[in-house]
Image (cartoon, rainbow, N blue to C red):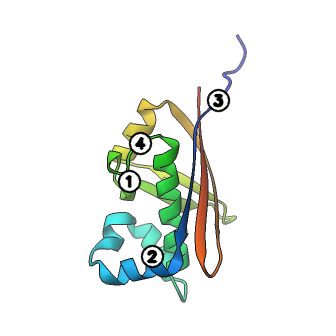
Amino acid sequence: MGPAVMAIVGVGADVVDLERFRASLERTAGLLDRLFTADEQAYATSAVDPTERLAVRFAAKEAVVKALASGLGAARLRDIEVVRAESGAPSLRLHETAAALAATHGVAAWHVSLSHSALVAQAFVGAEGL
């Protein structure tokens, strides 16, 4: 028997308005800790304006939930982590509730693309499974 063939399990996309996201961060105490891991926060706050880096990560988290065809409450967004390779390429690391949800959908690999401008941040996510 040949090697296993991967199939698309789901795709997701999300766009975040930077000014609205900035206002939410300023208005809602504890939002950073509810949405982002310590590593994500450290990476974002190393920039002059961390909003772009945070917003694009938030978009990726929302795109993951969409790729899994689940409602927002199905997994804690903090359990979906955007990590960077030394090259700067983004990838996903899922923890606890998000990892369990992905496992029930048979996800074996993730693909992620992030982009932002001065106005919006967007993310595209693809989930592959056997």
From the image, tell me which residue sits under label 2: 21
From the image, tell me which residue sits under label 4: 70
Residue 101 x/y as whole percent: 39, 38
What amino acid type should be assigned to the residue bearing mark 2?
Answer: Phe
Mark-to-mark CA distance, 4 and 3: 19 Å
Residue 17 x/y as whole percent: 53, 74
Identify the mark nearer the N-term, 4 or 3. Answer: 3
Q: Residue 76 or 118: which is nearer the viewer?
A: 118
When asked about the image quadrant of residue 22, the answer is bottom left
From the image, tell me which residue sits under label 1: 79
**Mark 2, other Cα within 10 Å: few <14 / some 14–19 / many ≥20:** some
Residue found at the far left of this picture: 29
Q: Nearer the viewer, mark 2 or mark 1?
A: 2
- Which quadrant of the figure contains the C terminus? top right
Identify the mark nearer the N-term, 1 or 4. Answer: 4
Mark-to-mark CA distance, 3 and 1: 24 Å
Q: Nearer the viewer, mark 3 or mark 1?
A: 3
Residue 103 x/y as whole percent: 44, 33
- Position of 126 relative to 86 (above/below): above
Q: Residue 1 or 52: which is nearer the viewer?
A: 52
The residue located at (50%, 49%) in the rendering is 64
The residue located at (52%, 35%) in the rendering is 107
Mark-to-mark CA distance, 4 and 2: 22 Å
What amino acid type should be assigned to the residue bearing mark 1?
Answer: Asp
When asked about the image quadrant of residue 47, the answer is bottom right
Q: Nearer the viewer, mark 4 or mark 3?
A: 4
- Position of 28 relative to 95 (above/below): below
What amino acid type should be assigned to the residue bearing mark 4?
Answer: Ser
What amino acid type should be assigned to the residue bearing mark 3?
Answer: Ala
Identify the mark nearer the N-term, 4 or 2. Answer: 2
Mark-to-mark CA distance, 2 and 1: 19 Å
